[in-house]
């Protein structure tokens, strides 16, 4: 449902519905850029704070906002 990428266009985050609701990928090496877990419903939006150090925020239908620091993106807190 939403995409966000870093200012150097090397890391991409995509969110939506399904078993794996969010994925963070390092485009150049085609590897994971972190484990994004914790939401219990579909994700609606995401954004990355640029420039470095990067931070990621996700919002979903479960009425939670989760914050991650990285990369690799690691869970920081939930509101």
Image: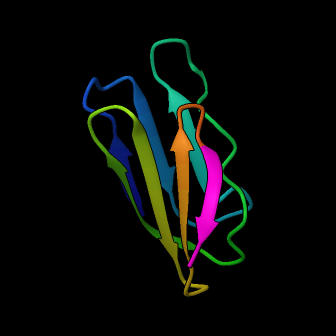
Q: Quadrant of residue 63?
A: bottom right
- Residue drawn at point x = 34 percent, y = 31 percent: 52
| Vertical arrangement, residue 48 with respect to residue 1, above or below | above
- Residue drawn at point x = 60 percent, y = 32 percent: 72
In the rendered image, residue 4, in percent from the top left (x then y), is placed at: 35, 47
The span shown in magenta is: 74-79
- Residue drawn at point x = 54 percent, y = 12 percent: 29
Q: Main secondary structure of the magenta part?
A: strand
Q: Nearer the viewer, residue 62 or 68?
A: 68
Magenta highlight on residue 75: yes
Q: Quadrant of residue 2?
A: bottom left
In the rendered image, residue 64, in percent from the top left (x then y), is placed at: 57, 80
| In-image side of 49 versus 56 (left or right) | left
| Vertical arrangement, residue 72 with respect to residue 17, above or below | above
Q: Nearer the viewer, residue 7 or 14?
A: 7
Q: Nearer the viewer, residue 31 or 79?
A: 79
């Amino acid at each position: 449902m939403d995409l966000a990428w870093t200012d150097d266009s090397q890391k991409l985050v995509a969110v939506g519905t399904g078993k794996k609701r969010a994925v963070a990928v390092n485009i150049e090496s085609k590897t994971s850029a972190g484990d994004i877990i914790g939401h219990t419903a579909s994700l609606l939006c995401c954004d990355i704070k640029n420039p470095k150090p990067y931070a990621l925020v996700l919002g979903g239908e479960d009425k939670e906002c989760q914050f991650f620091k990285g990369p690799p993106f690691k869970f920081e807190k939930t509101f």
